Amino acid sequence: MAIEINWIRDDASLARHCAEWQRLPYVVLDTEFVRVDTFYPLAGLVQVGDGSRAHLIDPLLIGDWSSFAALLENPAVVKVLHATSEDLEVFQRLAGALPVPLFDTQIAAAYLNLGFSMGYSRLVQELLGIELPKGETRSDWLQRPLSATQVSYAAEDVLHLAEVYQALQAKLPQDKNAWVLEDGAELVANQLRVTAPEDAYRDAKLAWKLAPAQLAVLRELCAWREREARTRNQPRNRVLRENSLWPLARYQPDNLVSLARIDDMHPKTVRQDGEFLLQLIKDAAATPPHSWPAPLPEPLPLEASALLKKLRAIGQREAERLDMAPELMLRKKTLEALLKSGFPNGPYQLPESLRGWRRELMGQALLDTLAGQPPGEQA
């Protein structure tokens, strides 16, 4: 059966279609992009499904994305995507907007205990009994013209995604549907949280091992790397490799020979930015103590692992009770943040990252377990 495809290749056509989509209860969305040598994804195609047709927007020909931004931000139209994290970056770059409300079919599948982080092809097979052809995700989506295989693949994606959404909606009870949308809102909120370059050092490997004077150097190195990656539109590791950051801050080389000997230091970095990096390290090392960052918290000790296991078991029990994928329940980072708030003797505080239905259902049980009483019993 031939697929009906509608190409959108100019601003007026996009505005006209967006006005029509604004009246729908939902639209399905997908993107194809290239991200090999760049910091930002390069959009090659945006697909929109209205439940019956596939619309392919050529981003190389669109100059005005305001109508599409209005559609993304319309709270009356549910935006349906699958495994949406990188798509959000594409929408933010193209339209300066993010999809709300967002229904991620991969998350919905986990709420129905079909599987966690389920691939799109497998979900289509599971719900629709359709075996999709091998994907074109690694092909060149910036080439023009696109191949017939690429076009067919992109169009089929949104046509089947609409059917997947309808099948999931038929199975999802009202509370779980609300939770899927809650998690979608969290994905959007995370995309909007931009870490300041000056705070990037907090996420560097082994940063907790450094003294405040060394952290001052690491802070400047990470901030420079973050800004340069964005300015040059290159991956962070192309600017300065992750594994070089800690030894640079620890040993603080003062000449090009020493710099070149740093772990995982790329020769091109030494040639292109070596002198600058040496000066940056020297200047950062000379900053007064009052401007140094505070020491970073150490990882949890081994003796916390038994307690971590107990806390994870609370999520496991709730997952079984609700017939959901256990990975949905309590994220490891959340449990570690909870333990770090008071380990080993308390008192403990629920972290800000434990929000919504998870906090409501499991927050008190977590605190009770840490206080040494069985979940649900009053002190």
Image: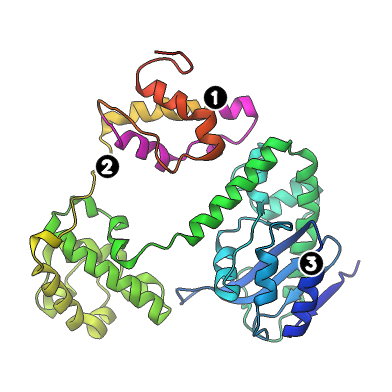
Residue wearing tag 2? 299
- The image's colouring method is rainbow
Q: Main secondary structure of the magenta part?
A: helix
Question: Measured from the top left, where is residue 101 in percent x and y?
Answer: 66, 55
**Residue ID at (75%, 49%):** 125
Task: Give the quadrant of the N terminus.
Answer: bottom right
Residue wearing tag 3? 21
Residue wearing tag 1? 317
Of residue 335 and residue 125, the one placed in the foreground of this image is: 335
Question: Measured from the top left, where is residue 258 in percent x and y?
Answer: 12, 73
Q: CA distance from mark 1 to mark 3?
A: 42 Å
Q: Which residues are magenta?
A: 318-343
Task: Give the quadrant of the C terminus.
Answer: top left
Tell me where residue 44 sits by quadrant: bottom right
Which one is in front in this view, the residue at disc 3 or the one at disc 2?
Answer: 3
Of residue 26 and residue 236, the one placed in the foreground of this image is: 26
Q: CA distance from mark 2 to mark 1?
A: 27 Å
Q: Give the side of residue 79 with respect to residue 245, left or right.
A: right
Question: Measured from the top left, where is residue 319 in percent x and y?
Answer: 58, 30
Provide the secondary structure element on which disc 2 rests: loop
Looking at the image, residue 104 lies above or below residue 23: above
324 magenta-colored = yes
Outermost residue, right side:
1
Residue type at the position of mark 3 = Trp
Residue type at the position of mark 1 = Arg
Circle 1 crowding by C-alpha within 10 Å: few under 14, some 14–19, many from 20 = few
Q: Is residue 136 visible?
A: no
Residue type at the position of mark 2 = Pro
198 magenta-colored = no
